[in-house]
Image (cartoon, rainbow, N blue to C red):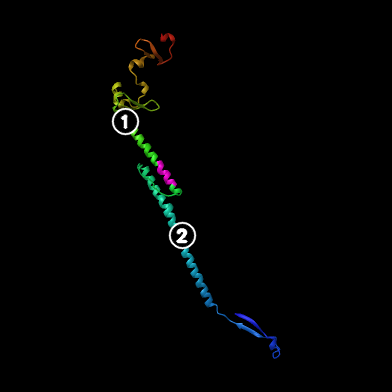
Amino acid sequence: RVVRLLYNQPRCQGCHREHKLGMLVIDFSLVDTEQKTMAVISKQLRYTLTVAVIIITALIGFVYLMVTRPLAHFVRIIRAINGGDLSRRVNLSREDEIGELAASFDGMVQRINARTQELELSEERFRGIFEEGPVGIVLANPDHKIVAANNVLCGLLGYSEQELVGQNIIDLTYEEDSLADVDMNVVMTGSGRFVEIQGTGEESSFSEEDLQ
């Protein structure tokens, strides 16, 4: 509702002395305006929600493509390598942090694979020497306990490998040596000249008289 006073114009005051002629009251209906306003607001809200849904969906898809799926692939490769398959690689051709991580990981696995192959080849060569070599070979742990012996050594000592495993390697000497008070090692030339003389007390120290 609009209310407005009606004033007498100066040119009309000769006939009409009243300064205020009356009041003008105008009523407006705002129902249509309110409906149109609500329709515009509702349309704007629907548009905003639609744009928000599209943006959120795009972000989820981006995260899945750029982060979640590569990391899931990464985890599958790690599990395969952990299972012993060193031939697997991540192979992500990307220039971001995930790509750098994948390249570093592939390089590390490549070096491990190469080192593993070298160790397997070295082990195969050693096993060939150990099993087929012409000399006696014994493997012992830091406590001097025998863990393996080849056939040549078993033949020299007159024991089977099962009998030797677990024994102290220092105890594997022939009877004359194990019963001697002093262990002497003498190296001489063909003309009888000494090259080296070494004496070791087996049970206790010895004097110069004992040596003579």
Whole-percent x, y for residue 90 in the image: 39, 47
The residues bearing labels 2 and 1 have C-alpha atoms spaced at a distance of 62 Å
Q: Residue 56 has which mark?
A: 2
Q: Earlier in the sequence, mark 2 or mark 1?
A: 2
* Location of residue 21 by image quarter: bottom right
Whole-percent x, y for residue 63 in the image: 44, 54
Q: Is residue 151 left or right of residue 7?
A: left
Q: Nearer the viewer, residue 76 or 125?
A: 125
Please state the extent of the stretch shown in magenta in the rendering.
100-108
Residue type at the position of mark 1: Arg
Compared with 32, 110 (above or below) is: above
Q: Residue 162 has which mark?
A: none
Within 10 Å of disc 1 (Cα), the crowding (few <14, some 14-19, many 20+) is few
Placement of the N terminus among the 4 image quadrants: bottom right
* Location of residue 184 by image quarter: top left
Within 10 Å of disc 2 (Cα), the crowding (few <14, some 14-19, many 20+) is few
SS label for mark 1: helix
Q: Nearer the viewer, residue 131 or 145?
A: 131
Q: Residue at x 37, y 38 (%)?
A: 114
**Total marks drawn?**
2
Whole-percent x, y for residue 153 in the image: 31, 23
Residue type at the position of mark 2: Ile
Q: Nearer the viewer, residue 42 or 179?
A: 42
* Location of residue 136 by image quarter: top left
Q: Is residue 4 left or right of residue 149?
A: right
Compared with 198, 115 (above or below) is: below
Q: Main secondary structure of the magenta part?
A: helix
Q: Residue at x 66, y 85 (%)?
A: 22
Pointers 2 and 1 in contact (C-beta within 8 Å):
no
Q: Nearer the viewer, residue 177 or 57?
A: 57
Residue with the mark numbered 1: 127
SS label for mark 2: helix
